[in-house]
């Protein structure tokens, strides 16, 4: 779920009077980069025949730390969704043939998610493209990340 400890209060220890013009430029560049990458990612997913939300779900299933697969609750936590919204997303992704539900091997009351062969192929293709794009962006945005490290 959303970690409230990560939020920053405006009237907290970081005062607005300490911010410089360069800080605002840095924040704009960061937000621009994030939005552009998000848009790029959504377009690549659609071109691959996968809805962007399905792509995000596929990544959660494949990269989940529990090798037996995530539960719907795990999906909700990773994607910052409410449980019922995660259930609907899983339902649509199952219908698309990208993931399947299965009972946990140790606790049959628990339902786990796993990729289908189609889901694994789509995710592998998209992940290769995303890693390539992130490497490409790294050269352009490297100074931005270093700027963030220096302002902490």
Image (cartoon, rainbow, N blue to C red):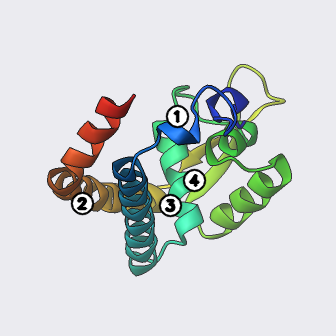
Q: Label 4 near label 3: C-beta < 8 Å?
A: yes
- 141 left or right of 124 in image: left
Q: Which mark is residue 64?
A: 1
The location of residue 31, given as percent across then percent down, is 44, 59
Q: Label 4 near label 1: C-beta < 8 Å?
A: no
Task: Report which residue position mark 3 lands on.
Answer: 55
Tell me which numbered mark, 1 or 2, is placed earlier along the sequence: 1
Q: Is residue 4 above or below residue 107?
A: below
The location of residue 52, given as percent across then percent down, is 53, 68
Query: Alpha-carbon distance for marks 3 and 2?
Result: 16 Å
Q: Which mark is residue 39?
A: none
- Local crowd size for mark 4, using a 10 Å CA cut-off: few (<14), some (14–19), many (≥20): many
- Local crowd size for mark 2, using a 10 Å CA cut-off: few (<14), some (14–19), many (≥20): some
- Where residue 127 sits, quadrant-wise, is bottom left
Identify the residue at image location x=70%, y=35%.
11
Tell me which numbered mark, 1 or 3, is placed earlier along the sequence: 3
Task: Report which residue position mark 2 lands on.
Answer: 133
| Front position in the image: 26 or 30 | 26
- 123 left or right of 115 in image: left
Task: Report which residue position mark 4 lands on.
Answer: 57
Query: Alpha-carbon distance for marks 1 and 2?
Result: 22 Å
């Amino acid at each position: 779920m959303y970690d409230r400890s990560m939020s920053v209060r405006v009237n907290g220890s970081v005062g607005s009077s300490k911010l410089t013009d360069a800080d605002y430029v840095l924040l704009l560049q960061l937000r621009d980069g994030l939005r552009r990458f998000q848009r790029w990612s959504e377009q690549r997913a659609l071109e691959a025949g996968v809805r962007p939300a399905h792509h995000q779900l596929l990544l959660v299933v494949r990269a989940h730390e529990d090798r037996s697969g995530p539960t719907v609750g795990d999906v909700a936590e990773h994607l910052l969704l409410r449980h019922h919204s995660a259930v609907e997303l899983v339902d649509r992704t199952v219908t698309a043939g990208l993931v399947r539900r299965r009972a946990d091997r140790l606790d049959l009351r628990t339902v786990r998610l796993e990729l289908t062969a189609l889901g694994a192929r789509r995710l592998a293709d998209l992940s290769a493209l995303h890693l390539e794009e992130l490497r490409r962006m790294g050269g352009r945005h490297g100074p931005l990340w270093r700027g963030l490290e220096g302002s902490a």
